[in-house]
Amino acid sequence: MILKGIEELKRFLEKPKSIVIIGHRNPDGDAMGSTLALKHYLDKKGHKCTVVVPNEYPDFLHWLPGSDTTYRFDWQNNQSKKAISKSDIIFLLDFNALHRVGHDMQKTLENYSNDFVMIDHHQQPDDVTYMYSDTNICSTCQMVYQFIEMNNDLDLIDTDIATCLYTGIMTDTGSFRFRSTTSLTHRIIADLIDKGAQNDKIHNNVFDSNSYGRLLLLGQALSNLQILPEYKTAFITLTDQEKQQHNFQKGDTDGVVNYALSLKDIIFAAIFIEDEEQGIIKISFRSKGKFSVNQFSRNHFEGGGHDNAAGGKSDVNMDETVTKFTSLLSKYKSELEVSYE
Ligand code: 5GP
Ligand code: MN
């Protein structure tokens, strides 16, 4: 764990400030939940906060309290840049390096003259002035809860804050099932329910709001699934054409990689999703046990993340990407064999 400058930060925040809060590009439940929860909390403390979201996020997160107050950097560029340049400090949540916000926004942040605060649980964080980094914590939302606790402000957590935090903890732990889910996580979740988070509604809003097209796309993904039992590996491909056939919307492929990991005896899963617009194959990796997909992705696919969940990309076409992936596996055979014993 890294805790840097937190007492100084507390003193800085004793007077009302203008604050911008940012999560990573392609925001997930933890990025949206943590940024909005922190906004609600700091607004309550008398600050004026703006959440700037790098780009589009899935429909199943639009119901989050405060979602309608955010700026989108990609299409509300001027307002976003103005909020950033006017701010006294910027909070960076749920990401470890400035490039994770996307190229244009990264350039804006690199020219920022005030300080950054990072609250994040990814490995190898960039060094900024104020830091709370802990790779053992399941979600940035749990860290925001603990940050509020460090400020002795747990009693300020209201229904909106509890709802946002519950959402991010739920999504980043795969509904409280990954190893990163601890007894403390469950105690925090219990407190969030006591403070007004409606657990059934939140699960419903996030997981039971599928479109018909999304389910058909899932069907396509499952029929593309390939299994390599000798490497305890399974992977899924989705081409741009297949996405368009089923009216692909942002977020439709979130979580699909987990179906590959749900196969008996499979401990390493990948999904390769063609993105013709960006000219890349976007990749998600998942694993069980000791095999680090963070390291695998860093080494071979320009990405990173956590030990058991990481992302990456490939600049060559789908066939070449899959060939590259499968031919790498023999090197890892012995590691994969013992990963989840
Ligand atoms: P997902 O596969 O759900 O997109 O991402 C899994 C985890 O890896 C998330 O924590 C996400 O923030 C991280 N991640 C996804 N893509 C990238 C990437 O391109 N680079 C890095 N460093 N992390 C990523
Ligand atoms: Mn996260």
Image (spheres, grey):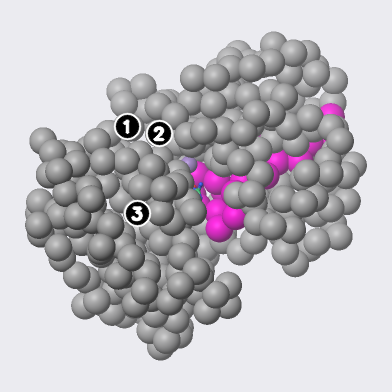
State the residue position of label 2. Answer: 138
State the residue position of label 3. Answer: 285
Q: Could you tell whether 25 is left or right of 245 in the image?
A: right
Crowd class of label 2 (few under 14; some 14 to 19; many from 20; radius 10 Å): many
Cβ atoms under marks 1 and 2 closer than 8 Å: yes
Crowd class of label 1 (few under 14; some 14 to 19; many from 20; radius 10 Å): many
Report the span colored magenta: 17-38
Residue at 62 percent of width and 33 percent of height: 126
Residue at 41 percent of width and 61 percent of height: 283
Q: Considering only order in the chain, which callout, 1 or 3, is on the residue closer to the N terminus?
A: 1
Q: Considering only order in the chain, which callout, 2 or 1, is on the residue closer to the N terminus?
A: 2
Q: What's the mark number on residue 181?
A: 1
The residue closer to the viewer here, 268 or 26, is 268
Label 2 – label 3 distance at C-alpha: 17 Å
Residue 22 magenta: yes
User: Taking the image as drawn, is residue 80 in sight?
Assistant: yes
Q: Name the secondary structure under disc 1.
A: loop
- The residue type indicated by label 2 comes to Cys
Q: Considering only order in the chain, which callout, 3 or 2, is on the residue closer to the N terminus?
A: 2
Indicate the quadrant where residue 35 lies: top right
The residue closer to the viewer here, 58 or 262, is 262
